[in-house]
Amino acid sequence: MTLLITGVSGQIGWELQRTLSGLGTVVAADRSKLDLSRRDSIVQAMRDIRPTLVVNPAAYTAVDLAESNEEAATAVNALAPGVLAEEAKRLGAGLVHFSTDYVFDGEKRGAYVETDPTNPLNVYGRTKLAGEQAIAAAGGRFLIFRTSWIYAARGKNFLQTILRLARERPEIRVVDDQRGAPTGARQIAEAVRDVLKKSTSCDWPSGLYHMTCAGDTTWFGFAQAILQRGLAPDTPRPALIPIASAEYPTAARRPKNSVLDNAKLAQTFGVRLPAWEAALAHCLRPAAA
């Protein structure tokens, strides 16, 4: 089995290289090998490598920048997944793709299920939704995993930002009226591995699945947990100040509710991610030691 993994320098892509190595031969493709902004690069790479399975965690993830750079976001998030899906179908390969909680507007009370109506508030969400639709339209074998609030021990993410600000500032103001499930890149990669182990021939039930850690919190609650678990006991702690979204204006609007229901993933594959607090503690264990 040959697995082509895109976006290997990203948070999920880096973890997937490690966790999926036992399933077959992994071909790790960074932008120099497969440029998702160019259709010809995608087609050439797919036809040269001829993978059994394509795993696509790569995305244009600069949510605010996407508002003024919609063409670039569309190329990577909307058009590229469709090309990957078409080429995968032509080769008889399966496709695993990652999407986002930002396809929803956040107005629902309670967790979102896969069949809930979508209504993205920003360019990033709209382009990711278009990517989902392009994959489904190609008619091949696919799994789309929607996840949320991704972080890791490396790269640029909320966890690393809070730890950096804790060293630089006496006070940190954090939004406290947006809810979601912080989800570690490692837990996502391990859950994907567990799903794929169910059928290495890619004959799984194609479709859309939510995949996040269990539980939910606000960005403020997430920041509190990071400082509690990520700083040594004798390290001075900055004051955390909860604020409303209106006090922290951004180019892109964010949904107030990003909580996703993971029941379908559990029922179909028997796969459950741990509670977000446990995943965070696991991620911070080396730093806290």
Image: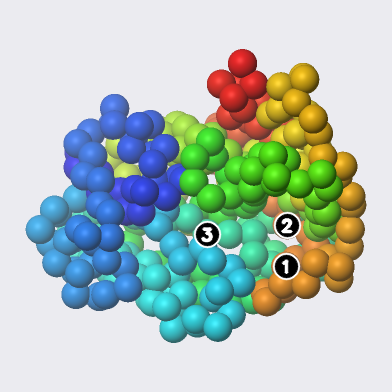
In this orientation, which residue lies closer to the viewer: 240 or 222? 240
> In screen coordinates, is 193 left or right of 39?
right
Give the residue at x 46% y 75%.
73
Amino acid identity at mark 2: Ser
**Picture layout, residue 143 above or below residue 84:** above
Residue occupied by mark 1: 254
Please tell me whether mark 1 sits on a helix, a strand or a loop: loop
Please state, as top left, top right, bottom left or bottom right, where the C terminus lies in the image: top right
Q: Position of residue 62 (x, y in %)?
A: 54, 66
Amino acid identity at mark 3: Ser
Q: CA distance from mark 2 to mark 3?
A: 13 Å
Q: CA distance from mark 1 to mark 3?
A: 15 Å
Amino acid identity at mark 1: Arg
Please state, as top left, top right, bottom left or bottom right, where the N terminus lies in the image: top left
Q: Position of residue 184 (x, y in %)?
A: 58, 39
Please tell me whether mark 3 sits on a helix, a strand or a loop: strand
Decide which of tag 2 and tag 3 comes sooner along the chain.
3
Residue occupied by mark 2: 258
The answer to whether marks 2 and 1 mark residues whose Cβ atoms lie closer than 8 Å is: yes
Decide which of tag 1 and tag 3 comes sooner along the chain.
3
Give the residue at x 63% y 68%.
103
- For disc 3, the neighbor class at 10 Å (few under 14, some 14 to 19, many from 20) is many
In this orientation, which residue lies closer to the viewer: 267 or 173? 173
Q: Looking at the rendered structure, which numbered label has been put on residue 99?
A: 3
> In screen coordinates, is 21 left or right of 154?
left
Q: Position of residue 266 (x, y in %)?
A: 60, 37
Query: Could you tell me if residue 25 is visible in this image?
Result: yes
In this orientation, which residue lies closer to the viewer: 168 or 204? 168
Q: CA distance from mark 2 to mark 1?
A: 9 Å
Give the residue at x 70% y 45%.
168
Q: Position of residue 219 (x, y in %)?
A: 77, 50
